Image (cartoon, coloured by chain):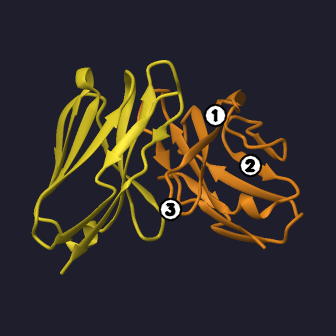
Amino acid sequence: GIQVEQSPPDLILQEGANSTLRCNFSDSVNNLQWFHQNPWGQLINLFYIPSGTKQNGRLSATTVATERYSLLYISSSQTTDSGVYFCAVVSAAGNKLTFGGGTRVLVKP
Amino acid sequence: GAGVSQSPRYKVAKRGQDVALRCDPISGHVSLFWYQQALGQGPEFLTYFQNEAQLDKSGLPSDRFFAERPEGSVSTLKIQRTQQEDSAVYLCASTLQLSGTQYFGPGTRLTVL
């Protein structure tokens, strides 16, 4: 099946810093989503982005489908940005989401 | 409803007990998915419904796990004779179309003692 790798696995930021999270996937995809899992376990949709670039406030994402990677940018980080960020994809031949291992982000005040 | 809801939010079971976990998808969403998330890991696929039809159950870890969606809306995940390794968060997601955005519920945290 499709493989999804996220990097870095852990990230510690000072409040106000910018960061980039990366997601590599091994095959063509119909769906790519970025999620933020908050400390209570809720998976919050950030982006649906199988290709192209999107922005939402301090967050933006870019997926280059032909090169099989996606990037999530966090600008001017805040302590509320702490949590785990997951990238998940649906392969072109499939229906289910396959998740990466996540990036654990800690933003310090 | 406004989002996907799940109940109960927390469940503690003694080893060997049967449990039933409920998912209410977003109204009108045809596709429904169940995922299992072990501590410190990403969610993993269990099973998928399109309306009332269970089209993929390849992720169910054993025949103790059973899911149904008899009327094409609410779904129930049942685990028989629970084992300690079943302890995890069980997440439900729904989507309007198969390759569209999947929206997740808050999950049910199952602890098997």
Real-space CA distance between mark 3 and mark 2, rounded to the nearest whole angstrom: 22 Å
Write down the quadrant of residue A3 in the picture. Answer: top left
Looking at the image, residue B84 sits to the left or right of residue B2; the answer is right
Q: Secondary structure at mark 1?
A: strand
The label on residue A81 is none
Q: Chain of mark 3?
A: B
Q: Secondary structure at mark 3?
A: loop
**Which class describes the residues within 10 Å of circle 3: few (<14), some (14-19), or many (20+)?**
few
Q: Chain of mark 1?
A: B
Identify the residue at horizontal 71%, vertical 27% (top origin). Answer: B53
Q: Residue A8 versus residue A43: which sits nearer the camera?
A: A8
Q: Which residue is mark 3?
A: B40
Reply above or below: B63 against B13.
Answer: above
Q: Which residue is mark 1?
A: B48
**Which class describes the residues within 10 Å of circle 1: few (<14), some (14-19), or many (20+)?**
many
Q: Residue A31, image x and y in percent?
A: 39, 30
Real-space CA distance between mark 1 and mark 2, rounded to the nearest whole angstrom: 11 Å
Q: Which residue is mark 2?
A: B77
Q: Which chain is yellow?
A: A
Identify the residue at horizontal 57%, vertical 56% (top origin). Answer: B5
Q: Secondary structure at mark 2?
A: strand
Q: Residue B13, image x and y in percent?
A: 80, 70
Looking at the image, residue A61 sits to the left or right of residue B30; the answer is left
What quarter of the picture does the C terminus of chain B occupy?
Answer: bottom right
Identify the residue at horizontal 11%, vertical 60% (top origin). Answer: A18
Q: Which chain is orange?
A: B
For badge 1, the amino acid type reads Tyr
